[in-house]
Image (spheres, rainbow, N blue to C red):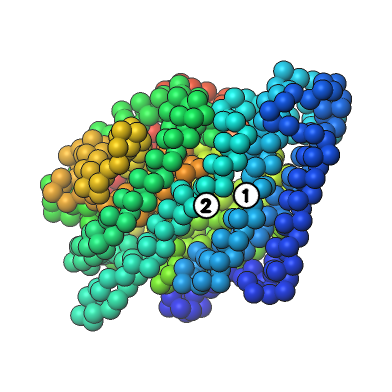
């Protein structure tokens, strides 16, 4: 397989629909609208009123009504999510495709009533019968199977505006926060800059490709990439500021109207953790900063510096780091997954061989990597921007972990599969850990081991130290946005201050990355505020689980697969309790960070 970007595999979704302009796709779009209309008819027929308690309060009757709604909702959500994934497979890989952009807009418009049916009408109705939910969920069948969903819905119904206000907010999202989110994605995917390559040629690259110069073996190229990024992000800073002001302003307004304590409050509920759990984890993370600063300083020393400028944060351990072809990366991941579980290994091979992965970077393609569920065919699709580094191999393993998580949940309904971000990273980070351990064990020399440790610690430092900086940034942005809009300069200042507070003297304060807030899509999701600390939760939770796996061996795997299948049906604390883990104490998080600390010690000794 040739590893030129334009010849790397692209994902195939023709088993879903032949194309974005096909008759099958058009018919499916019509069917989705019909399914949503059926739910509306069901609501009318059974008088599901979010503002008025039902006259018949017999739990058996209410269970029958709720079950009928849930069954219809699951069928429609499965169909709708399949359509969404298919459309997004075009939008995320070619932002210039106006047909796909229009299809996405049409899908979003068509789903406004669905959101209202589930998140407004049914949730409000459940709130009217919250006191009877314990009896309703005892009824055998759909309600018993969806007990957690119904109980959580009853709890969250307390944070609703009136049905009319919720409906208006839902409709306005498309032309408000949702539109700002789209603009951020389009700007980022279409930004380009001229780069002088190693052989002296001048080429125009998309920023999604320039980003990967961060881990280039030559400092000259890393610095060129850093300067190109600053120039590009800076050229659009006012547009980004408008996007972020619009989104955070909308979220603040809705949180206030819904009776939320703050923006963190809603994210905690979405994450299915409580504030004491977050505070315990954050405290342990903060305590670990000196450990990570030792790593940063040691890395700087290897590079002949006292502290790291931003362009060296992702520098490889040596300029001779192994470069993987995509085929080599796939074989390495599949072979080592087999040591953990043949089922995991078979899943990974199937994903690769069936072209479920879009591999190389190119203009118009989204930056980074992600995995999306395609429920209609019980498959997933993975987007990468593969560049041959071990980090790319690790990312491949990470995203295959997300796909495996989806695979383990096959057979569960859509409402049973609603997984919080805190638990969504469990399988992905577990898979990364498997690959890192395998690479360390297979290392043939201290230099090779150093390179692997560098990649691992760089990733861990990003998920602990940088994620904490992002949390600080977003928290301050929400607080200040409640008073007034912020300028691009203010966003830059908040970002730099957050980096200084977390990285400390591990970084050269003259060369930070003040524009981190511009291109990170996580800040621009109105529905997922604080889309940062869940990554730290995932890393440290998975690290703790991996330690248990090392103690228990093969008999751990079946329990682990059951955990992945159940992440939509219990709180994080309850699922952790299955393995004897108490996430509300600082000790658990500190112990997981100590595991990372042993790798810092290894790094310092090499």
Return the residue nearer the eye: 466 or 294: 466
Q: Residue at x 31, y 50 (%)?
A: 241
- Above or below for 576 versus 115: above
Q: Residue at x 76, y 51 (%)?
A: 37
Near mark 1 (Cα within 10 A), the count class, few <14, some 14-19 or many ≥20, is some
Label 1: element kind: helix
Return the residue nearer the eye: 572 or 450: 572
Q: Residue 212, percent across and down?
A: 34, 63
Image quadrant assignment for residue 386? bottom left
Quick check: can you spot residue 201?
yes
Image-based side of 194 in relation to 75, left or right: left
Near mark 2 (Cα within 10 A), the count class, few <14, some 14-19 or many ≥20, is some
Quick check: can you spot residue 468?
no
Q: CA distance from mark 1 to mark 2?
A: 9 Å
Label 2: element kind: helix
Return the residue nearer the eye: 28 or 39: 39
Image-based side of 283 in relation to 572, left or right: left
Q: Please give the residue where the numbered disc 2 appears in the rendered image.
A: 174
Q: Residue at x 80, y 45 (%)?
A: 41
Q: Please give the residue where the numbered disc 1 appears in the rendered image.
A: 112
Instruction: State if disc 2 and disc 1 touch (CB < 8 Å).
Output: yes
Q: Earlier in the sequence, mark 1 or mark 2?
A: 1
Q: Residue 552, percent across and down?
A: 59, 35
Q: Residue 24, percent across and down?
A: 73, 71
């Amino acid at each position: 397989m040739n590893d030129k970007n334009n010849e790397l595999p692209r994902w195939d979704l023709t088993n879903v629909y032949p194309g974005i302009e096909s008759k099958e796709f058009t018919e499916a779009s019509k069917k989705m609208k019909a399914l949503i209309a059926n739910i509306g008819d069901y609501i009318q027929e059974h008088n599901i009123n979010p503002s008025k308690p039902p006259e018949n309060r017999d739990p058996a009757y209410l269970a029958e009504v709720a079950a009928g709604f849930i069954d219809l909702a699951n069928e429609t959500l499965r169909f709708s999510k399949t359509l969404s994934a298919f459309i997004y497979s075009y939008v995320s890989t070619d932002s210039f495709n106006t047909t796909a952009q229009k299809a996405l807009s049409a899908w979003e418009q068509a789903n406004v009533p669905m959101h209202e049916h589930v998140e407004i009408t049914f949730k409000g109705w459940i709130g009217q019968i919250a006191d009877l939910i314990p009896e309703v969920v005892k009824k055998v069948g759909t309600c018993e199977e969806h007990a957690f969903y119904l109980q959580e819905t009853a709890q969250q119904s307390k944070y609703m505006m009136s049905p009319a206000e919720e409906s208006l907010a839902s409709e306005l999202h498309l032309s408000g926060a949702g539109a700002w989110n789209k603009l951020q994605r389009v700007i980022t995917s279409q930004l380009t800059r001229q780069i002088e390559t190693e052989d002296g040629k001048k080429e125009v690259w998309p920023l999604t490709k320039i980003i990967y110069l961060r881990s280039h073996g030559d400092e000259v190229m890393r610095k060129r990439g850093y300067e190109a990024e600053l120039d590009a992000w800076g050229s659009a800073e006012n547009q980004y500021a408008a996007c972020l002001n619009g989104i955070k302003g909308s979220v603040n307004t809705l949180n206030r109207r819904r009776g939320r304590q703050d923006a963190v409050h809603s994210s905690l509920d979405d994450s299915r953790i409580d504030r004491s759990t977050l505070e315990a984890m954050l405290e342990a993370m903060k305590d670990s900063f000196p450990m990570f600063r030792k790593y940063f300083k040691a890395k700087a020393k290897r590079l002949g510096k006292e502290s790291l400028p931003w362009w060296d944060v992702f520098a490889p351990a040596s300029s001779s780091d192994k470069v993987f072809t995509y085929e080599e990366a796939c074989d390495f991941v599949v072979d080592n997954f087999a040591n953990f579980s043949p089922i995991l290994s078979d899943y990974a091979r199937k994903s690769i061989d069936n072209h479920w992965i879009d591999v190389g970077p190119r203009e118009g393609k989204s930056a980074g990597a992600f995995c999306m569920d395609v429920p209609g065919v019980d498959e997933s699709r993975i987007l990468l921007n593969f560049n041959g580094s071990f980090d790319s191999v690790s990312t491949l393993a990470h995203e295959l972990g997300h796909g495996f998580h989806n695979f383990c949940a096959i057979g569960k309904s859509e409402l049973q599969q609603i997984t919080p971000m805190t638990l969504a990273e469990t399988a992905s980070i577990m898979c990364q850990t498997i690959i890192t351990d395998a690479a360390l064990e297979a290392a043939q020399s201290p230099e090779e081991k150093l390179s692997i440790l560098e990649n691992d610690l760089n990733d861990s430092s990003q998920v602990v130290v940088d994620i904490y900086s992002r949390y600080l940034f977003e928290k301050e942005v929400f607080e200040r946005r409640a008073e007034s809009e912020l300028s691009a300069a203010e966003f830059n200042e908040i970002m730099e201050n957050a980096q200084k507070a977390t990285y400390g003297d591990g970084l050269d304060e003259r060369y930070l990355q003040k524009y981190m807030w511009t291109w990170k899509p996580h800040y621009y999701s109105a529905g997922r505020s604080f889309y940062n600390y869940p990554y730290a939760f995932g890393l440290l939770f998975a690290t703790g689980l991996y330690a248990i796996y090392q103690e228990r061996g093969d008999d751990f795997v079946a329990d682990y697969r059951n955990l992945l299948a159940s992440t939509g049906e219990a709180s994080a604390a309850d699922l952790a309790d299955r393995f004897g883990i108490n996430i509300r104490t600082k000790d658990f998080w500190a112990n997981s960070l100590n595991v990372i600390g042993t790798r810092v010690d290894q790094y310092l000794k090499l």
